[in-house]
Image (tube, grey):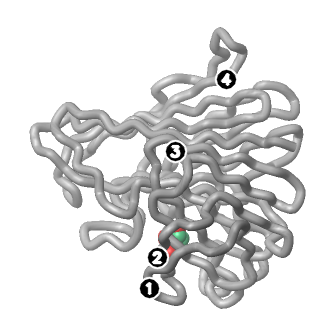
Amino acid sequence: MTGELPKLVLKKDEKTAVEVYLHGATVTSWKCKGKEMLFVSKNAVFNGVKAIRGGIPVVFPNFGPWELGPQHGFARTETWKIHQQPEKDESGNIVAALVLEDTEQTRKIWDYNFKFLYTLTLKDDEFSTEVSIENTGTKGFHFTTLVHTYYNVDISKMKLRGLHGCEYIDKVGGGEKKEEREALQISGNVDSVYKNTANELLLSTGDHEIRITKENLPDTVVWNPWIEKAKQMSDFGDTEYKNMVCVEPGYVAKPYDLRPAEVFKAKQTITCLC
Ligand code: TA6
């Protein structure tokens, strides 16, 4: 039930489109070649309060548990404003932008001034999300940010390449490890924070090859809840772990210190290669 929450539709043609809700600036659909590339749980809640379970939730100003506010920060549960309606650019791509600025509500839990501009660009086989975070106040602040991208996959066939040799924090098994595998496959609960990863990763979903390219997002989180954690999530089907994986580019291993008037820019580009 996607409800009546306001959203933008970026439509290039009958087989190429993106949907993004103002709630959390959450992209909930990227159709490429007529196929839905992103996973959204059939139990996802669209009540304008809870974070939408799936698509591309925006994590800011904190990745993970946060002593000041909700896990993964407030960006994914705030209502963003339309900065630019979807429109065709000179190259025939569809561009739209949403914006989130500090409010009385956000300042109550995190007393800083910011402007987060989120620009979406849809091309034929490629979709990018650009992050621009400006410190609009007089106080410096630190933050972590990440695009929490959920992909439709057959988990029994899924392979993720590009993390070989990276150091990572294993949040399931504990400790810091080094990735020895050339291609990551998942057969259990995985929650890993890979540090200083390559700017290009290749995700084989079982049906498609998706190239994940990132700029100024040095880290990559890989997550699948598997059986027990899937059961514990009310907004996630008990067996949905079989057809999703999260591959999440972010700036999360250490916070970024943003000085007054400074702008932090980052970008994720996902391309369907076949
Ligand atoms: O990105 C992985 C992760 O941090 C996991 O630890 C898990 O908590 C996941 O995010 C989902 O978090 P959420 O708050 O959306 O349930």
Mark 4 nearby-residue class (10 Å; few <14, some 14–19, many ≥20) = many
Is residue 77 visible from the viewing direction of this image? no
Name the side, left or right, on which 185 lies relative to 247: right
Which residue is labeled 2 in the image? 169
First reached walking from the N terminus: tag 4 or tag 1: 4
Name the side, left or right, on which 49 lies relative to 252: right
Q: Residue at x 37, y 60 (%)?
A: 73
Question: How many labels, in total?
Answer: 4
First reached walking from the N terminus: tag 3 or tag 4: 3
Which SS class for mark 4? Answer: strand
Q: Nearer the viewer, mark 3 or mark 1?
A: 1
Q: Nearer the viewer, residue 97 or 225?
A: 225
First reached walking from the N terminus: tag 3 or tag 1: 3
Residue found at the far left of this picture = 138
Mark 1 nearby-residue class (10 Å; few <14, some 14–19, many ≥20) = few
Which residue is labeled 1 in the image? 175
Q: Nearer the viewer, mark 3 or mark 4?
A: 4
Which residue is labeled 4 in the image? 94
Amino acid type, mark 3: Ala
Could you tell me residue 122's position as x and y percent?
68, 30
Residue 243, by quadrant, is bottom right
Could you tell me residue 256's position as x and y percent?
28, 51
Residue 148, by quadrant, is bottom right
Which SS class for mark 3? Answer: loop
Mark linked to residue 25: 3
Q: Nearer the viewer, mark 2 or mark 3?
A: 2
